Amino acid sequence: MIEFVASNAHRRLNELAIHSIKINAAVCYWTMPSKEFCPEFLSALKNKDSCLVVDIHSPTSIDSLAEFTQAGANIFLYLFQIVGKTETPDSKGIPDHLMHAKVFIFDYGTNEIKIWVGSHNGTRRALLGLNFEFASVFTCERGSDIHLKALHFVERIQKISTKFKQSEIDLYRTIQGGNLADSFIELIDKKATPIGKQSVISIFGKREADYAQLQKVGKTVYLSITNSASGVECIYKASVSQSGYLDKKSISSLKLGPRRYAVKSDSSIPMLEVQQAIPSNLYSTCKYFVTLKVDAPIDDSKAVEAPDGNFWIDVEKNAYLIGAVQPIFDEALIVSDGHEIGKFRIQGVNLGQAEVIFSSEPISDMQRSLKVLTLSERCALPAHPLIRKRMLVKLGKAEPSVDSEKTEA
């Protein structure tokens, strides 16, 4: 028996789940939280032999999947992508993903099995009717050819996917690109001089690329000031209150009173000068200035390094395509039925490499600490733009690192 579903997809999925004891599913994108499904849907996914496999790429919601796992559901993440040209030249905007299935297998513990195959992702837009979607529901016997083929298909995807872990949520967000880093301006202070709230600090610079990131008045940034003697880093929230190019016209009308300032001239971290009048030569030797209005220090957080997201590695195709009816491979050239599809690489997440970065003690229930570089480590970075991306995380057991070379002295 075949049933067609062209409307009320969300309601029909819940109805199919009501008497099920097990669900095996593979769905490309998932955003809907568990509370938007009937209790039986969640209960069936808690069966040890159940699975819901979802592609990690956006718009999949890591938070929604975390809700499912917190309730005991067996969630798996598909961590592969394709890199290379596989489509015609005028095909634009096709995601570099591989897992695009939308299939649910409902097992009722009886001889009857129902299989949902359609276009619906696990999104509100798809399941609640904004999109034009279509699905077929097949009713078949347990152990029938259609049942076993569908089950084998989902199990094969599950086999090469990764079980969702609550402890790795920050890792998943970073892989997906959803762990947004903050903009930091880093300065060195020779003296441990606290910065008062509503203070102003001006930065003079010679590289227009730096100014392009800061010219917008009102832009919020974080200011990192590290004492060179102790290595202790203080973090402040700040905003751009004034900015401009230093040409002859602007210099004649620019009036900056005594203040603390820094000069960004090369790839090193600028030194924060003491409160004083701005040296006149800076107006002629620098190309721009930016004035920051500084807020109170942030004492409950630390700034960690934002991972570069370079967790993807090439994967041997034969190892990836386990048990499939495969096309012929010849040095990354796919040929299927005589048609050349393209040259490409398959990449997967190097979880071993990625988890090392996230291996320290949790800062909070759903966060893991990334590394805090000491001042000497940050100074040794090969390139140091005026604005550098770091991540601000709440303090837990782990305390901010200090420069061991300085503290031992």
Image: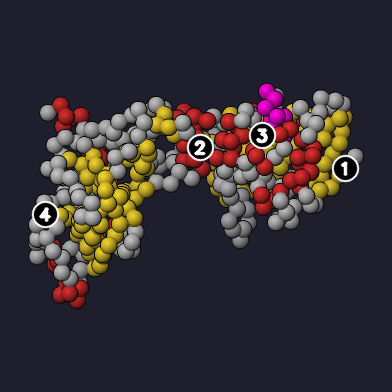
User: Mark 4 and mark 2: span between their CA atoms?
Assistant: 45 Å
Q: Is residue 320 left or right of residue 393?
A: right
Q: Residue at x 68, y 23 (%)?
A: 48
- Judging by the rendered image, the residue that carries numbered circle 2 is 172
Could you tell me the amino acid type at mark 1? Ile
Principal SS element in the magenta part? helix
Q: Residue at x 30, y 57 (%)?
A: 239
Q: Residue at x 30, y 50 (%)?
A: 237
Q: Is residue 243 left or right of residue 194?
A: right
Asked if 397 appears above or below 243 in the picture, the reply is above
Query: Which callout, 4 or 2, points to the residue nearer the camera?
Result: 4
Q: Quadrant of residue 305?
A: top left
Q: Residues within 10 Å of mark 3 (few under 14, many from 20)?
A: many
- Judging by the rendered image, the residue that carries numbered circle 1 is 2
Compare residues 93 and 296 and report the one nearer the observer.
296
Q: Earlier in the sequence, mark 1 or mark 4?
A: 1
Residue 52 image label: 3
Q: Is residue 229 left or right of residue 311?
A: left
* Tag 1 and tag 2, C-beta contact below 8 Å: no
- Judging by the rendered image, the residue that carries numbered circle 4 is 275
